Image (spheres, grey):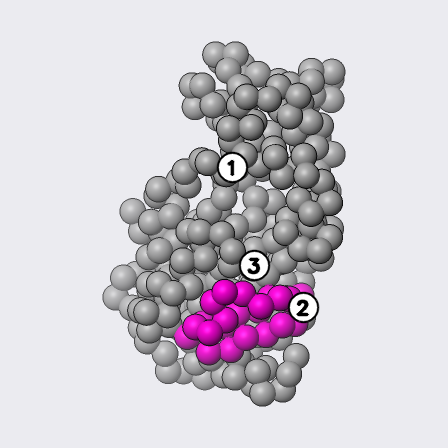
Amino acid sequence: MPSDACKAARALVASAHRITVLTGAGVSTDSGIPDFRGPDGLWTRDADAGKAASLDAYLTDPELRRLAWRTRLDSPVWTAKPNAAHRALVELERSGRLRTVVTQNIDGLHQKAGSDPHRVLELHGTLHATVCLGCGATGPMRDALKRVADGEPEPDCPRCRGILKSATISFGQELDAEILRRARLAALDCDVLLVAGTSLSVQPASGLVPLAARAGAEVIICNAEPTPYDSLAAVVLHEPVGEVLPDLSAVPPSGGGRFSSWGDPSTWS
């Protein structure tokens, strides 16, 4: 990490009282979960995997759905363990400074690492649950995967026999309005927005950066490649998040920062 950028980022974290973190796929790559758009990303290597992320394609192509279920069965998410980046955010939360983790990831590793589930906002849903596209019924992903392992190429909804998919947000599908509302509040009510492991190429997640900056937050961006919002950041670090986040989480508080009267984001309703 460049020394000047490191010092600047550490100083911002030291003086912060209300840190919101926005994480992307780059936070989970050290856990063996590939990203999507990088040079070795899942969608870069496998065009069909990218097609399965489209809701229209998933609804209209039975073979694509069967492929998606085979892919889910073999997903590295099921054996992945939290890495140093996830654990660092837990430590930052325990210090009393991290208020909210807004994540684009669907792997549940923040919670598995020990982050308070009420403080983790999963913008793009979760792979650990299923949802019926007909009646809206939800259920554990493990139940559907057991049916696939037992020989069903495409498990349907046990309630209405409708099309079942993971409870993740596909292209062409709207985000959960309440989760998005809370994410925007967290961006507005922070003194530091720490962005880690995301290319900031997908809305509305990327829109949280200018929202926080306009509200007066200092923005730290840590990503392997440049992002469209680097110009808004006080500090940009093109270093591994598995090194940057543990370094920042170890910084002791120095006082200062802006206090909020909004209360604990985990209680917002």
Residue of label 3: 198
Q: Residues within 10 Å of mark 3 (few under 14, many from 20)?
A: many
Q: Nearer the viewer, residue 138 or 61?
A: 61
Between circles 2 and 1, the one closer to the viewer is: 1
Q: Do tag 2 and tag 3 residues touch (Cβ < 8 Å)?
A: no
Residue of label 1: 170
Residue of label 2: 240
Query: Label 3 is placed on what type of residue?
Result: Thr
Q: Secondary structure at mark 1?
A: loop
User: Image point 42% across, 51% down: which residue?
Assistant: 204
User: Image point 73% across, 17% down: which residue?
Assistant: 150
Q: Residues within 10 Å of mark 2 (few under 14, many from 20)?
A: some
Q: Tell me the distance, in whole angstroms, between the alpha carbons under discs 2 and 1.
A: 28 Å
Query: Label 2 is placed on what type of residue?
Result: Pro
* Place of residue 76 in the rendered image (x, y in percent of width and height, measured from the top left): 72, 42
* Place of residue 185 in the rendered image (x, y in percent of width and height, measured from the top left): 33, 57
Between discs 2 and 1, the one toward the N terminus: 1
* Place of residue 26 in the rendered image (x, y in percent of width and height, measured from the top left): 63, 58
Q: Secondary structure at mark 2?
A: loop
Q: Nearer the viewer, residue 245 or 33?
A: 33
Query: Label 1 is placed on what type of residue?
Result: Ser
Between discs 2 and 3, the one toward the N terminus: 3
